[in-house]
Image (cartoon, rainbow, N blue to C red):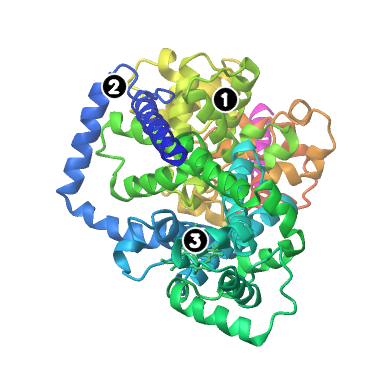
Amino acid sequence: MAFDILLNSSLTILGVGLIIKMIQWLSYKTGIRAENESMLQRLAAALKGVLSTVFSLRFFNLPQTFVLDILFLRRTFKQDLLRWIMHMLIFWGFILLFFMHALESIVSDNLFSYYYSTINPFMFLRDLFGAMVLVGLLIAVFRRFFMKIQRMTSNAQDIYAILIVGIIIVSGFGLEGTKIISYNEFLNMEDEFAALDYEEDIFALESYWVKNYGLASPNNISNVSEEVLALGEEIHNDTCIDCHTKPTAAFGGYAVSRAFKPFAGILEFIGAVNIFYWIHILACFIGLAILPFTKMFHIVTTPLSLFTSAVMKRENASPLNIATRQAIELDACVHCTTCSSNCSVAPAFDILGNENIMPSERMMALRRFSTKQKISSQDFLAIQEGICLCSSCERCTVVCPAGINLKELWYDVREHFIRNGSIVTPLVLTPYSYNRAYSRDEFESPLQDSPAREAKSFIGRKYNKGKFVERDKPLPLIPDKDQPDKKDMGLTQDTFAYCFSCENCTNICPVVMNYEKPEEALDMLPHQIMRSLGLGLTDLVLGANMLWDCVTCYQCQENCPQNVKVTDIFFELKNQISKECFKNHENES
Ligand code: HEC
């Protein structure tokens, strides 16, 4: 009765939660898309998108995604074996328990006519699945709290997820263990299935169960005779054996029962079976009821995100659907922090200490932001800094096991912030954010025409105090394909194109390290010079002190993940300047 009321209320709360979530997905506006459209328009666009997928060839991507990415976590497997093992154990253990045990009346009873949770193989399997989850959880705790994985942080949701699953499983084992020893359980069963009239028969059965089934009895059965045991076995074979395998098969519960046996009397007195039962049931129901607002909701959203990324093509998707998808993606993030350990600007976090530089943390902040929970202005600025430092190298998107298109999310949110009056240093922006950030009011030509060029001239003017001259052709220093003779230093245009401003060169530079405010002393930092050259802003870098302060230790060059020849380029720049100086000198004299 109480069970039914609780089950129904948690299902109702779950339903309401799901509706709230869907409303949130359809009304999310943190990005730049779908700013003026109503929820109904977005719902219509979503339905249209789903229908057009169902009737397209892309639909056939789904089975592969389902099996490889969802059931077997291919992406995680490729990245981190231990994490894959952990997740496979928890996922499969829990799913199998859910269907075999939690839904036994719907699934197991119908699939197997002989199903009883107290006979093999089900008895053994239930413990096996539970043990799988438990081992998985132990690995999770070990990874999160003892392994010191780089840039891995844990928040309340991460801890909740481990706790709720842990409580369900541990209380399950506790329940099984206390039931095995419980004398009351035995008496109830005897009453129901044997209904023995004589005390001696009950005692015989009891003795048999104490000896063979782990029961704890308040009566003294140490001296029972062989005859009594034989009588017990006979009754057992008549009335109990069809539904009961020896409890040793339930290895987890049986181990618990052995540990609890000395305290059987107290446990019976306090009603331990009931206590474990209610902890178990309440944990399940609470977990279910609040599912949409917890990390565990990823069992729905992450597959959803993987499915959408398998069928949705960015180019021809409706902006409304991209907005909706981004909202789902925020919920699909499991905070595994794979993105942060691969992020090319995350080293900046070590210096600046702003968590939002790490994509995984920014994701959490954006989630709070998108659901309009209060966000302090300080947090807002921190998110801005994080989002503007992003170099759009796309590594986060490539590695995300949940298939989230993080790069696109950063673009959109960045533009959203920029529109709301951002204060950022131009050189930390990517070419995509330049035009969105600055050219909107400055330039007349349509933004999409040549964003990089417009960005260049804007930055040129900003840094050269208005003296910037835009050239039709870049200085010969940056050789282009028309000038193959300039290849002598190996400085082809590609050299800079690979730079994505990871700042490795700057971080490792002993000259930079030497100054408290290197950007003032050196004018420009190595990565800024590379970035500017990549944009064709040669004029901008020629005057930078950095070039002349360089001690040519070659550390930058050796540590560049993209093989940019930073030090060689510095040499080339200095030669170029010297040449120009000589030329001017000769002309003058
Ligand atoms: C129709 C099948 C059936 C029969 C017959 C049956 N039991 Fe059970 N018994 C069960 C099930 C199912 C459970 C577990 C109930 C639950 O999960 O709450 C159980 C639980 C128990 C428990 C608690 C320990 C545990 O493993 O959960 C005891 C003790 C027990 N039975 C004793 C007996 C005895 C003694 C007899 C014979 C007189 C008997 N049962 C006959 C199905 C049966």
Task: Please state which amino acid type lies under the numbered disc 1.
Answer: Pro
Q: Which residue bears the numbered disc 2?
A: 39
Task: Assign the magenta stretch its main secondary structure.
Answer: helix
Per the image, label 2 sits on a secondary structure element best described as helix
- Position of residue 482 relative to residue 579, above or below, is below
The x and y percentages for residue 164 are 58, 45
Mark 1 residue crowding within 10 angstroms, few (<14) / some (14–19) / many (20+): some
Determine the CA span between mark 2 and mark 3: 60 Å
Q: Which residues are magenta?
A: 571-589
| Residue corresponding to mark 3 | 191
In terms of sequence position, does the residue under pointer 2 or pointer 1 come before the other? 2
In the image, which is nearer the foreground, mark 2 or mark 3?
Answer: 3
* Residue 149 seen in the current view: no
Looking at the rendered structure, the kind of residue marked 2 is Met
Numbered disc 3: secondary structure: helix
Is label 1 within 8 A of ligand 1 (CB to nearest ligand atom)?
Answer: no
Q: Amino acid at mark 3?
A: Asp
View extreme (front): residue = 198
Write down the residue under mark 1.
426
Distance in Å between CA atoms under marks 3 and 1: 81 Å
Tell me the quarter of the image containing the N terminus.
top left
Q: Quadrant of residue 323?
A: top left
Vertical order, 509 against 466 (above or below): below
**421 or 487, which is in the foreground?**
421
Residue depth check, mark 2 versus mark 1: number of the one nearer the observer: 2
Q: Position of residue 223 (x, y in %)?
A: 74, 79
Quarter of the view holding residue 110: bottom left
